[in-house]
Every structure is written in C-alpha cells, then in structure tokens.
Amino acid sequence: MSEPVNANLYAHLRAAFPEDLDRIAVETDDGLHYSWRDLDRASAMIANLFDALELDAGARIAVQVEKSVEAMVLYLATLRAGFVFLPLNTAYRSAEIEYFIGNAEPAVVVCSSANASWVGPIAQAAGTQHVFTLDDDRSGTLLEVASQCGDEQAIAMKEDDDLAAILYTSGTTGRSKGAMLTHRNLLSNAEVLKDYWGWRSAEEGGDVLIHALPIFHVHGLFVAIHGALISGSKMIWFNRFDAKRVVARLPEASVFMGVPTLYVRMLGERGLTRKACRHMRVFISGSAPLLIETFNEWRERTGHTILERYGMSETAMLTSNPYHAVQGERRGGTVGFPLPGVQLRVLDDAGAPCLTDDIGHIQVDGPNVFAGYWRMPEKTAEEFTADGYFKTGDVGKIDGLGYVTIVGRSKDLIISGGYNVYPAEIEGVINEMPGVAESAIVGVPHADFGEVGVAIVIPKPGAMLDGDSIIAELKERLANFKIPKRCFVVPELPRNAMGKVQKALLREQHKGLFSGG
Ligand code: MLC
Ligand code: AMP
C-alpha cells in the first residue's frame, strides 16, 4: 500500500529545502545568519513544545509579536505541529485584541513582553491556557521553554482541507471576520506562484529575496515567505522597512516584494540606480493600487518593469501580470491575468456576465479560495454565490487580451500604505464619543500612503468638539494606521435625496489635502 500523502504545508516547504542544509536561508540586515538546518531545528523545538501542551486538534495559536526570524519560525512550528496560526498586527490596541482573542478562543497566545501585562489578562479572560512572550531580540519565554525541547519532530499529518491559518479582515459592517485558510489554499497558491514568477531553485543558482514587509498579513507572511522557502531561496530579512537600507542591499538581491508605499519611498533614495538593481530579476507590487506614475518612474530609474499582482486575505493571490515576456507585457495600471487554476469573472449589478471592458463586480473561484469565515456561517453564505464563487467586493474589468484592471471597490474601504481601513469601524468609535451626533470617514489621495482617511464629524446641538482631541482619543483605541490624518468638525454632512451621506462629494472636497491637487 502506498503511504498517505501529507497535505501539511510545512512538509512541502521542507521538501524544497536545499540538499545542503548548512547553506544560509536567512540573513538579517543586522548581520545574523540562519541556515536551513537552523530553521528546521528551531521550528521542530517549538512544535515539540506545542505537542507537549496536548492542545486540542484545530487549536488556534494567536501571535502578536514584532517581526523577527523567530516569529517566522513560530509560524512554521505551528504548521508542522498541525495547529492553526492566527497572526495579529502589532499596531492593534487592547479593544481590538480583546475582540480577536474573544472570537478565536486561541489555546495559546504569544505576545511581546512589553504587551504581556495587558494581553495576558485578555487571553486568560477568554480561556486561553498558555501565554508566552517573544521579542525581536531572540528573548522571551517561548524560546526559553522551547530550548528544553528536542530538535527533531515528526511533521503532523494533515488533510487538504484542514485549517492552517486564520486571518482577520475587517468588514464594511459589524466586526472583523476570521478568514479560514486551509493547507491546500496556501500550498496551491505557493506552487502556482513559484512557477508563474519563475522562482529559481537552488540548483539553478537560487534567488535572493529582500523581505521587508510585516509578517502578519498575506503579502509578507504567505506570498513572500512561501515563495522563498518553496524555491529554496535565501532571504535578506528586515524587521522593519527602511528605504535607505533596502536600497543598499539591492545589489545582493534578485527578488523584491512591496506595497506601493515601499516603492514610492525607495524612489526617494538617490542610491536607487540601474547599477544597484543589476542582479534583480523581478520587482513585485500588490495589496494596493500602484500609481502609473510610480510604475513609469521605477522603469526609468531602474530599467525594471514592476510586476503588479492582486490578491486578498480570503484568497491569497488571484491575478498577476506576466513574468515571462512570451506570456505578454507587464501593463501598468492592470493586475494582469487570473493565475493558473483561478477562475475570475466580472458580473453586472443584475448578475449577468459583463462584456469585454465593461465594469462590474469581481468574483473568483479556485483551490486558493478560503474555507469561510470563522464561526460566521451566515456571513460566509452571503459572500459566496449559489455556484460557489467568492464575491471579492472589488470592482473591475477585463480587456480583450484578458488583462484585469481594478477600478474601484463596492466595499467602503480605504487602503492606506497597504493596510485596509474600514470607515464603518472608525465612524462607530467616533459616534460613541460624547457630543458627537454623527461622522463620516473618507479616503483621499496621499503621496506616501496612496490613500489616507479624513474624518468629518457633526456635533450634537450645543456640543463643542475639537478635531485634534477626537484624533487623540482615536489613537488610544485603534491601531495607528486606522487613525484619520485630519478631522474636521462641521455643522452638517451632504446628503442625497434618500438621506444618504454623499461620500463622493466629501472625497472631492478634501482630495487636495495631502496631494496638492
Ligand atoms: C504607519 N502609519 C500609517 C501607516 N503606517 N498611516 C496610514 N497608513 C499606514 N499604512 C502612521 C504611523 O502610525 C505614524 O503615525 C505615521 O503614519 C508615520 O509613520 P511611518 O513611520 O512613516 O510609518 P512606518 O512605520 O514607516 O510604516 C509605513 C509602512 C507600513 C508603509 C512601512 O505601513 C507597512 O509596512 N505597510 C505594509 C502593509 C502590508 O504589508 N500590507 C499587506 C496586506 S496583505 P503617528 O501619528 O504616530 O506619526 C493584502 C493582500 C494582498 O492586502 O493582496 O497582498
Ligand atoms: P486584504 O483584505 O487586506 O487582504 O486586502 C485585499 C484587498 O486589497 C483587495 O480586495 C483589493 O481591494 C486590494 N488589492 C490587493 N492588491 C491590489 C492591487 N494590486 N491593486 C488594487 N487593489 C489591490
């Protein structure tokens, strides 16, 4: 009888490690080196720690820690032990963390030692049995305990549809939803991208990826890390993005991935030249629209054409501009073609397929599409069509050659520096403040972040409100990237005949605030 195939994503990543495990897998910008053997052994030790805790099958491991190679190893350990990884943005404040932990009920929470005094009690109140700390200087209780564990571990057997991760994404109404991603979702996407983007195996000389993105969202955690590991490529690792430092390391690299803000900031560096990019194979952008000005300026300065792709937490990557010239040119302003295995269609408001170049709602299907929202069957049902397509909430079109262009969103969403900000969430917090009758958040263009939020607040009769105080109060309660960059207190909001706030008008009024337009 043949051996059952293990669908565990880690088993597949591990199988792609180079034969020579003593080669460098990760080099940090501050000079630390990790071999492939180090990654394997360190992840085995943490996986053994989890095994010893005798967690239930499907237990969630929630992690809110600063970026570090050890934090990546913790992700790999969670996969190999067969549990569910739940990454949380380090910017989240206590009310946000309380919601995620209360909703996901993780068996284990790992946080920074600086936050343990408030994350620990939140976790305990939610029934979490184990709280560990992990800092970005290789300290914390997680590593202390793991150092007592063996460095060999049998990778847990998993099926295709077993959960590997839960990523929380906000929504236009109500609270955040946990997108459940399976081992198959993540592995299928990693394998497709390995091929589509021409990752070079170690035998072919290998790639060198500059990893400068946060690792609590799809882009940095899955697209970048899986891409490097599944092709046995080395990573140059930055715990924090620093445009000058990244540009200084470009001559050693062949692949870079970033949100548009990273490209804009690197263009501000004099060191960004053709010579600096001479070993680069591909620059990839995503998570937010890349301005055509940035696309063109990058080509002029470096001689490289940025490859833009499109994806979501719920689906990982969906479309990509071509890597190989034979597949077509990379077109600025478009997100390219549906990836192999992805079905993508554009429908009009009535649900009929749009004609070429007509704008409509983007729906997708494929092995990469998530298994639903954690403990929210009704929300899940709402977001899928009767024939199984996921409604992305993005609005776009497909041209005669098959290139997909995103032209907007049907969801009320601002993407700021690659992070999603849902106006409804911020309006909800402002509306609870004393003296506030109502509020509206709109996104306006911003040279650095692409788009930022602006708050327009209406006071209750007789109340005296001040925009700066509202912003100060928001900073106490919400992650920093969600904070509107300006807050105006005005007597009323523009409304249409139906009484609905005219956000388009507000956007128009404030569009020149940060772009001089
Ligand atoms: C920081 N600030 C932001 C912000 N990041 N404000 C709006 N939007 C953001 N993204 C705030 C800070 O709190 C600070 O406020 C002020 O802006 C200036 O901060 P900074 O020092 O310039 O910011 P920095 O720490 O350098 O961070 C900027 C950044 C970061 C661009 C490096 O935001 C980042 O790493 N973005 C990448 C996000 C990402 O990985 N997205 C992928 C999602 S996956 P104050 O008031 O304190 O001065 C996804 C799916 C897909 O979308 O398709 O990939
Ligand atoms: P998230 O929910 O954080 O995963 O964000 C996913 C959303 O980011 C998508 O639904 C799109 O609206 C947006 N997005 C991702 N990539 C691109 C891109 N290349 N161009 C425009 N929007 C993008």
Image (cartoon, rainbow, N blue to C red):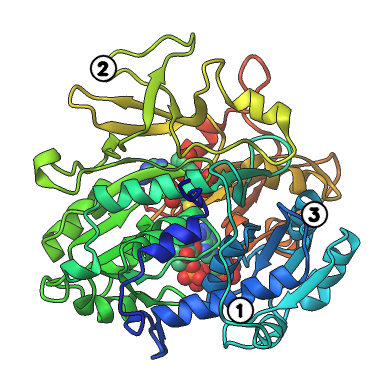
Amino acid type of the residue tagged 2 in the rendering = Thr
Depth order, front residue of 397/188: 188
Q: Report the Cα–Cα distance between label 1 and label 2.
A: 53 Å
Amino acid type at mark 3? Glu
- Read off the residue under disc 1: 45
Mark 1 surroundings within 10 Å by alpha-carbon count, few (fewer than 14), some (14 through 19), many (20 or more): many
129 left or right of 391? right
Q: Nearer the viewer, mark 3 or mark 1?
A: 1
Badge 2 crowding class, 10 Å Cα cut-off, few under 14, some 14 to 19, many 20 or more, is few
Disc on the earlier residue, 1 or 2 = 1
Q: CA distance from mark 2 to mark 3?
A: 46 Å
Is the C-beta separation of discs 2 and 3 under 8 Å? no
Q: Residue at x 53, y 22 (%)?
A: 388
Quadrant of res 61: bottom right
The residue located at (80%, 70%) in the rendering is 130
Residue 416 shows up from this direction: no
Work out which residue is located at the far right of the displayed protein and give it.
Answer: 125
The residue that label 3 is drawn on is: 105
Spot occupied by residue 235 in the image (x, y as percentages of width and height): 35, 74
Q: Which mark is residue 356?
A: 2
In percent of the image, x 38 and y 51: which residue is there?
Answer: 190
Residue farthest to the front, as pictured: 1
Give SS at disc 3.
loop
